[in-house]
Amino acid sequence: MTVRLLLFLSLLFPNCHHFNFNLDWAKENHSFYLGSKDASFSTIPNSDLNSARPEFEGDYSIVSKDFADGSVDFLPFDSSDYSFREFAFDQSEIEMTAKIASFVSASGGSRWLSSEPSVAPSSTSPYSNYLSNAKSTETAVGRLLTKYRLFDYNDNHLKELSFISTAFMVGPDLLVTSGHSLFLDPSVASIGFDDGVHNPRFPDEALFFPYSLESRFPNGVEIERIYIEKAFYLSGERDWGCAKLRDSIGQQTGYFGLIRSFKEPSQNVRMLGFAGKNGGDLSVSKGKILSFDSGGGYCSDLDSSAGQSGSPVLMRLNGEEYVVGINDYGKGSFSGGIVIDDFIFGFIDSFLGATNVETISIADEKILSFEPLGKNDLMVDAITPSGIKYQTRQYAASIEQRTASKRTDDNAIYYEYSFRRPLVQVAINFGEAVDSAASSSASKIKLETWNDETKWSYRIPLSFNESSSKTNTAKQTTIVFDDLVYRFRIASYGLPPESIDVYLETGTYFPLNGSELPYEPEKWNYKPVVNYTNCYSYAINNQVYPGTNTLFYMRPGEYHGVMMSNLDVNEIVQACKRDFAKYSNTFHHTYLFGSIGKYAVPPDGMYKVALLVADSVYYRDFHFMRQDSDGYWSHKKGSDPARRNDLDKYSYNLITDPETCYLGFYEFCGFYAVHPWNNMYIEE
């Protein structure tokens, strides 16, 4: 079914007393119930709709407005590769790491809202995945109030237009509703305020009023950020959205669970919403979903009227109700909307899921007679049960290592694992082997983590003579990381682990693609290289003028021959692109420099760099940083040595995020994916 585009705004209720609108500067207030889109309307041509959109070049799938500063962000999101609250924009990495560690400890490692059902459906059930443990109550649905402030040229007054629709809680601080409840054209003829242009926009303010809890939240709960899908932003398709609340009220309201990819017709469902025809009170409609379409939409015989946009469509399973769809159009006893498909489910779960707990297989490749320290050869590809790829290998400690240590128990078996996203913690389970090993002094295990600067770091020794006894049946040890860890290994001395669980989340993370360069400052911090290379040279791994052995202190555009004339970000980027174009043409490559999302995986052969600019009366400069193969970021400021710490001279804070680290006079300007040139100086 084609999702309709025009908004059917009707049923004006001037005597509605659910909300109090008192703004001294407003000439007049309007309160409209936001109707579901009328299914009989035809779609507005895309050319008309797109004419009102600002241009944006980049790979994005979500458009978001931040009410704190009014900014609009274009965000990448891949439902197969997402991180805990990575789009929530509300907590630092340190705060989130502590929160996850506390949660995991309290919950025993299970997910907060799991993608595994707490009650398994029957073998014939079509529901392969749903969020469980939701505290589903009717207080989890409520009125969504959006306010738009516009100037009415008819009477030359500033006015506030207010629209009421329905939204529902899906977590402690996350709402779901229709897309047109969050992004619409408030100046249309149906409300007598038509500017003659179809120009949908985000509201100036948004509030949520949970049902029957008005006394607890008399002024509503502020919404701090809203999200819609790219397709709705551009063309009106995919009519759904999310809203993040400023306060976590889910423990008071409850929240609904979700069934993913529901596609079984004739199931009994019900819909909760605030119909204007009932004076804005809660309306309950019962019926069936009649059909589905290939675009993720559904049709139903549920009654729908103005005010019910964004209403949840609920189905009962195993004694609990779950949301299967979001209402966005209809009239009378005919309505429809969008089902909770993989993309919607994944985006919601990226806010709600705690750590992705994955059980990884014990490496069972042939044991090697040497240890390939610091190399990635001999790694084999593997995949977790949920589809996350990683690499693993198994090997014995080298003869040289055992001889140097002069310890008989250093003949360890190593199990090594490498991921493309960082780990929060690792839990090692020894099962029945614990009791049998309790009396063996040689039975112990250690865990080491890798980064490019310190190489292998010893993180935990575990002697079962000390930690277990015949009366202590503890079978698992957990190591929580407070730094970036993408790669680790377990050395087992006489006691192989039976299973290993990895927790694949941090507050924010940068996924790797395996093409990132290792941090090797020794290649940059010697004379004359250190003196005659700079941040741009370092970012693209180019020490010399291509085709020569002459050191090259690169400035954007200099290789191409057209230097940038100022510190405008667009001009810097275009200058870099011209350099890459000339290099590709000269040496018959296809080397690129292009914008990339913060959480996007770079294409094969490329890695991320960050651009910073300082343009003030105090300091004027550009600067680049690049992401290394262990996830940290490094940079070379002018002729200074390459380093990994931020721009604070008095501390040594490793850079995990160039957007949030200390930048001094610089401002963060964006992430870019680059191919390295790899032209290195040869000592003569």
Image (tube, rainbow, N blue to C red):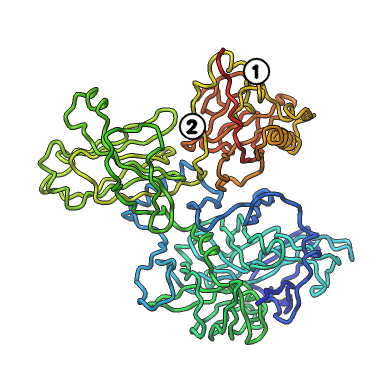
Query: For the point 59% across and 63% down, which residue is it?
Result: 220
Tell me if residue 332 comes above or below residue 122 in the rendering: below
Name the amino acid type tagged 2.
Pro
The quadrant of the rendering that contains the N terminus is bottom right
The residues tagged by marks 1 and 2 sit, at their Cα atoms, a distance apart of 24 Å
Residue 425 appears at what percent x and percent y?
36, 45
**In the image, 389: left or right of 673?**
left
Tag 1 residue: 550
Query: For the point 76% across and 77% down, which residue is it?
Result: 42
**In the image, 566: left or right of 370?**
right
289 and 29: which one is in front? 289
Which dot, 1 or 2, sits closer to the camera?
1
Q: Secondary structure at mark 1?
A: loop
**In the image, 217: left or right of 670?**
left
Q: Secondary structure at mark 2?
A: loop
Name the amino acid type tagged 1.
Thr
Residue 512 appears at what percent x and percent y?
50, 43
Query: Is the Cβ of the residue at disc 1 closer than 8 Å to that at disc 2?
Result: no
Query: For the point 29% across and 33% down, which residue is it?
Result: 370
Counting residues from the N terminus, which is met first, the one under dot 1 or under dot 2? 2
Query: For the point 58% across and 17% down, which residue is it?
Result: 529
Tag 2 residue: 518
